[in-house]
Image (spheres, helix red, strand yellow):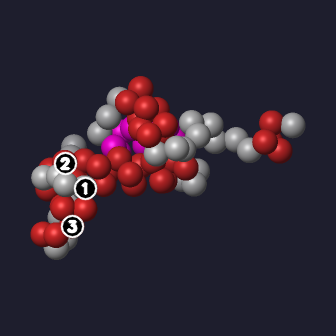
Amino acid sequence: MTVHVAIDLPETAFSALRSTPEAFAREMRLAAAVKWYEVGMISQGKAAEIAGVSRHDFLEALSRFHVSPFQITASELE
């Protein structure tokens, strides 16, 4: 099942990324999923699902956004 969500944005928002509304929406989904993963709200698998990409592509996106793929702190490793 898919749910569609509408978000009102000014037309000038798309120029921020020099993209079409569709590409902007894909990037926004990915950015949200990366952030939610980064703060520990969701797993990698769920983040990939939300972003609409494979887990492999999500891991590549983490690198692009400079986010660690590991959700563990240095003190937890010790």
Secondary structure at numbered mark 3: helix
Read off the residue under disc 3: 13
Determine the main secondary structure of the stretch shown in magenta.
helix
| Residue 16 location, quadrant | bottom left
CA distance for labels 3 and 2? 12 Å
Q: Which label sits in the foreground, 1 or 2?
A: 1
Write down the region rendered in magenta: 43-51
Residue drawn at x 14%, y 56% is 21
Disc 1 and disc 2 in contact, CB within 8 angstroms: yes
Secondary structure at numbered mark 2: helix
Residue drawn at x 48%, y 53% is 35
CA distance for labels 3 and 1? 8 Å
Q: Which mark is residue 23?
A: 2
Tell me: 16 left or right of 33: left
Q: Is residue 21 visible?
A: yes
Q: Is residue 42 visible?
A: no
Indicate the amino acid at tag 1. Answer: Leu
